[in-house]
Amino acid sequence: MTKARRSNSGRRYSGGGKSGSGRPGAGKTSHKKKFDRSRSAEHKPESDEKIAKKQRSLKEIYKDRQAASESTNTPNYNFRKMKELAKKKAAKSGGEEGAPQSYAVRLNKFIANAGVCSRREADRLISEGEISVNGKVVREMGYKVEPKDKVSWQGKLLSREKSVYVLLNKPKDFLTTTDDPKNRKTVMELVKKAAGERIYPVGRLDRMTTGLLLLTNDGELAEKLAHPSNNVRKIYQVELDKPITEEDFAKIQNTIELEDGPVPVDDLVILSSDAKSLGIEIHLGRNRIVRRTFEHLGYEVVKLDRVVYAGLDKKDLPRGKWRYLSEKELIHLKYFL
């Protein structure tokens, strides 16, 4: 745990070495039935009335999002500066400085980034001939647009939605989801005034886990942070129902095996004199991985708090509050993580 804070009572048990770099085992083979494309192709086309209703709905949603976006004071990030820093980094690591770089994006992604709808719904708009590029209707799936291209939907010129990055200190009893069919509290209620744009959580904290959660509409960054190959660093403070034994401490340090594979831990520290409070650093992103690690050894996790995520911390961020990322933090996440 790099430069982890420890109280006067903080200590490490001796005997356990640092965990290896074991990779999680392969998950269970899926036995779900294959999608029957032949049956899907036979479905009846939607009626003109139903299509018109969808179009009206999308128009209203898009209009509302634009109005909400204009009413919020979200930061304006200097992405040109970020790209220049990325080029310098590539040059230092042996890449070709000044090599041509394409900023073309798929048309469905551009439409989604404009806040019109999801990518799947954008595919429908494209296939039905509702999208034009530089005055010409485009129906081709996978079509890419350059920054200079002008994309229109039903005569309205679209522009990329403003990128928003919100860091939340999540309280317990809130679900990490954009919508809950049971109408339980979600993290979206806590950040509803943060942006008019459609933002969503990166990763997941379970209902009773507290701490840092990033929300954004930047799909590329969200994918980067969620991908296991990037080994995104996370630090949790754990409160157990009973003191951890030296034997179990060493087992966790030396990688325990769960039903879905090994759990390599980057660091583990005792934070309290009664050995019930610990700090754990881990880069795995599997579901409830910290809780399951301790439950496997017979402990109940009373409290679980994520105090560091991808280099971001909770300094000056009270529970239940949020803030925007600084430009420096964003540069680190996008280009230096």
Image (cartoon, rainbow, N blue to C red):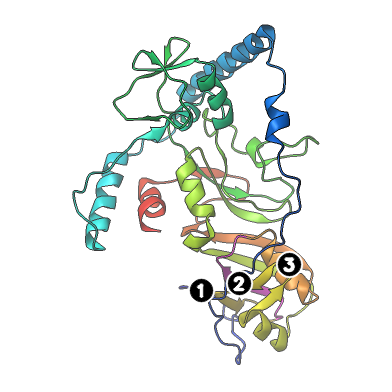
CB under 8 Å between callouts 3 and 1? no
Q: Which residues are magenta?
A: 274-285
Q: Is residue 281 magenta?
A: yes
Q: Residue at x 77, y 73 (%)?
A: 296
Image quadrant where residue 238 sits: bottom right
In front here: 204 or 48?
A: 48
CB under 8 Å between callouts 2 and 3? no
**Pointer 1: what residue?**
1
Disc 3 is placed on an element classified as helix
**Pointer 3: what residue?**
292
Q: Earlier in the sequence, mark 2 or mark 3?
A: 2
Query: Taking 19 as reference, is 169 above or below it?
Result: above
Q: Earlier in the sequence, mark 3 or mark 1?
A: 1
- Identity, as a three-letter code, of the amino acid under mark 1: Met
User: How far separated are the C-alphas under marks 3 and 1?
Assistant: 20 Å
**Pointer 2: what residue?**
279
Disc 2 is placed on an element classified as strand
User: How far separated are the C-alphas under marks 2 and 1?
Assistant: 9 Å
